[in-house]
Image (cartoon, grey):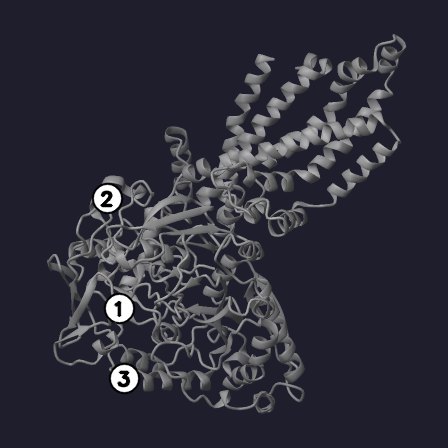
Amino acid sequence: MFNYTLRRILTVVPTLLVLIIFSFYLMRLAPGGPFTSEKPLPPAVMKNVLERYGMDQPLYVQLWTYIKNIVFHFDFGPSFSQKDRTVNDVIAQGFPVTLTYGFWSAVFVLVLGIPLGIVAALRHNSFWDYTMTGLAIFSQIFPNFVLAPILVLLFTLSWGLLPGGGWNGGQWEYIIMPAIALGTSYMAGVARLTRGSMLEVLNAPFILTARSKGLPERTIIWRHALKPALLPTLTYMGPVFVYMITGSVFIDVFFSTGGIGQDFIDGAYSRDYAMLLGLAVLYSLLTFTLNLLLDLMYAWIDPKVRSNL
Amino acid sequence: MKIRSAIIPMLLSTTLVTAAYAADVPEGTQLAATQVFTYRVLDEFSSFDPQVVEDVNGSEVVRDLFEGLYNQNAEGEIVPGVALSHTVSEDNKTYTFTLRDDAKWSDGTPVTAGDFVYAWQRAVEPELASPYAWYMELMSIENGAAIIAGEKPITDLGVSAPDDHTLVVQLSQPLPYFAKMVSHATTFPSPKWVIDEHGSEWTRPENIVTNGAYVLTEHVPKERSVRERNEMYWDNDKTVLDKVVTLVIGDDAQGLTRWRAGEVDKTEIPSGQYPTLKEEFPTEAYALPRLCNYYMTFNVKNGPEPFQDVRVRQALSYALDRDVIVDRVLQGGQFSAYTFTPGATDGFEIPEVAYANMTQAERDAKAKDLLAEAGYGPDGEKLSFTYLYNTSESHQQIAIVASQMWKQKLGVEVTLENQEWKVFLETRGNQNFELARGAWCGDYNEASTFLDLLTSQSGYNDGKFSNARVDELMAEAKSSQDTNPLYAEVEAILADEMPVIPIYHYSTNIMLSDSIQGWPINNVEQTWYAKDLYKVAE
């Protein structure tokens, strides 16, 4: 397992390098640049601006400087659109925000989704099952851009219970709506996945064996059925979790959380090269880390996987 | 006496500006117990550094944090800031400002003329590479352009401080509206000792030192910023608002929802919703004139051949019913435009432009005739071209309406093409278009900020229109005492030559709570200062 982990970690470096080089050149292909504006800068001013950001150098020199700064100074460069700040500043401020509401959203998804799925599976074809399934489908057809305004309409405008947006240092009343809006359709997905795989597992021969041995139902569910039934959910949650903690553009814009989700879009529109690259690196590091954790969890849950590592 | 009279004196004279402007609370007003003003901004600010900031919202904050030589009052006229008055030399090229002696930075240091010299040198310094260096060039400060180009040291800039309370500015050419330009953020003073100590992090709340009515106390990028009363400000006694909070809300509709919920006092109205909101909140929905125009520009350099024919350009312009666009499509209190310069521009009187006075039916008839004369239309060649605009719902609506008008009235076939903002700018800037959308917002409140765009040497003249007489008139206007006849002639040439089709002049649509008073609704640049506002009890 240790060797496996080490091997995986070592592959990150070349992967990241390829990603940086590829993204770096790809971004420059887009017409316009960070300083293209409705009022074009006079040539002398433009020259000074380009020099200041080292953009007067040939592309390969810029790329080399960029990589060097990351490796030796962990410096992702200046932001062109937020001129008083560096990309490191932007990520340091925005990432904890998205991480916070993304985390609570994931908690919401799992704490509600898994029990709903299990109950539906155990009470198969009963009133509970239909209610849960109905609820899950209903939630799934509510994308966050429909759900968020509804939540605000109810909780802010009608009942005056929660603030309509903002972050305010991450106080709980500011987290609730973003977390629910972000998580609801995933929660529904998790509930349905859990229900499906639980049903499958419950009909598996080893559960039949357990039943015939006379084990109590509780032990069968908790000790034998739950672990394998959660495997598909885990697979599903990996990428979803990365998506959640790197922020949803919509949630960030709509609830004005100040998270990094919006920086992706802003960065693309304003051609904020350093910002985009920095976020791409962050995104891929997170994807990698969570995928690795997920694989290790598989191994923990499933002996078949463990023996293959 | 208004500051504009500074333009008139031929002899050395002293100009006093009107009394300082502060929150003007009528007697008997019941003020709210907590004087906090919260408003929505669309995006995170580009910077709080006066010499670096380049966005409108950022400049609003900077105007509260820093104070320049002059401020603007509710009418957009200049009133004393750090400077009390100025004199102009006989040749109109030397301005001497007298600074007040009670202005202080928030750390207690007196504000001196040297702080302005430092800031202005900083604005043109190639190392800082301020994108707004061009504004200093526009101000015609001696050697500004050469310093930006790296040909001269910053110490050669035509600005000096003979003593702590005198600032002398040397211009390379007379500029009648120079005094108006010093209420712009780029010209605000900067605290050298703070910048030296903290470098690029000097604008953080924990480091920043300001000389305006407020200090920055909190800043969470992309979420909120808080500025609070600066106890050291010379006119602090008259400031009423204690605290100003900005919330970044990226979505217009959500901004409105939070205004309804009472979370913000001011927000922009989502496009198309002004009429209904005005009905629902008659005293809180505003449509304010704004110094911006919306136009379409012909590519007269390498556009399609028909565009070289002035009759075709006129016909296309005449056939557009501006009133329909303004009253039926936009519905936000915009103004139909027949001149390039908005009528709200200070000192600009809309000249008589023949086609503006016709009825739309007359214009339509004339358009058909003109197009036929040029050999296009039902009996001639078919006219077709592409109209390019940047991707946006309201631009698209206008494009569709315009193309329908052209099709129905003139039988012209228009292909609509939209591009993402920066792609669009690059395409238009490289003259890879036939007819393109354009818009321009004034940098200062004077007609030349618009009309200069259509001179041959302008870097913003994307249609590459070139007319020797226009160039001549605009050059003359730079030093003229009476510019209106010159601008009227330029507008007449534009109406004749029709290099651009003016569509409308902008308005700003905002929701502003009744409790906030003192908003300068007559200031067409929407230059407001929190120190002039106050909150009444509801």
Q: Please give left or right for residue A109 compared with residue A262 in the image.
A: right
Q: Which residue carries the number 1 mark?
A: B79
Between disc 1 and disc 3, whose residue precedes?
1
Residue name at image x 52 percent, y 84 percent:
B314
Q: Residues within 10 Å of mark 1 (few under 14, many from 20)?
A: many
The answer to whether tags 3 and 2 share a subunit is yes
Q: Which mark is residue B482?
A: 3
Q: Residues within 10 Å of mark 2 (few under 14, many from 20)?
A: some
Q: Please give left or right for residue A222 compared with residue A105 in the image.
A: right
Q: Please give left or right for residue A83 compared with residue A156 in the image.
A: left
The answer to whether tags 1 and 3 share a subunit is yes
Dot 3 amino acid type: Asp
Q: Is residue B118 visible?
A: yes
Residue name at image x 43 percent, y 73 percent:
B464
Name the chain letter of the residue that bears numbered label 1: B
Q: Please give left or right for residue B227 compared with residue A188 in the image.
A: left
Front label number (1 vs 2): 1
Dot 1 amino acid type: Val
Name the chain letter of the residue that bears numbered label 3: B
Kind of element beneath mark 1: strand
Kind of element beneath mark 2: helix
C-alpha span from label 1 to label 2: 28 Å
Image coords of residue B510 (percent x, y): 50, 64
Residue B450 is drawn in which quadrant?
bottom left
Image coords of residue B495 (percent x, y): 45, 85
Name the chain letter of the residue that bears numbered label 2: B
Kind of element beneath mark 3: loop
Q: Residues within 10 Å of mark 3 (few under 14, many from 20)?
A: few
Between disc 1 and disc 2, whose residue precedes?
1
Q: Which residue carries the number 2 mark?
A: B194
Dot 2 amino acid type: Val
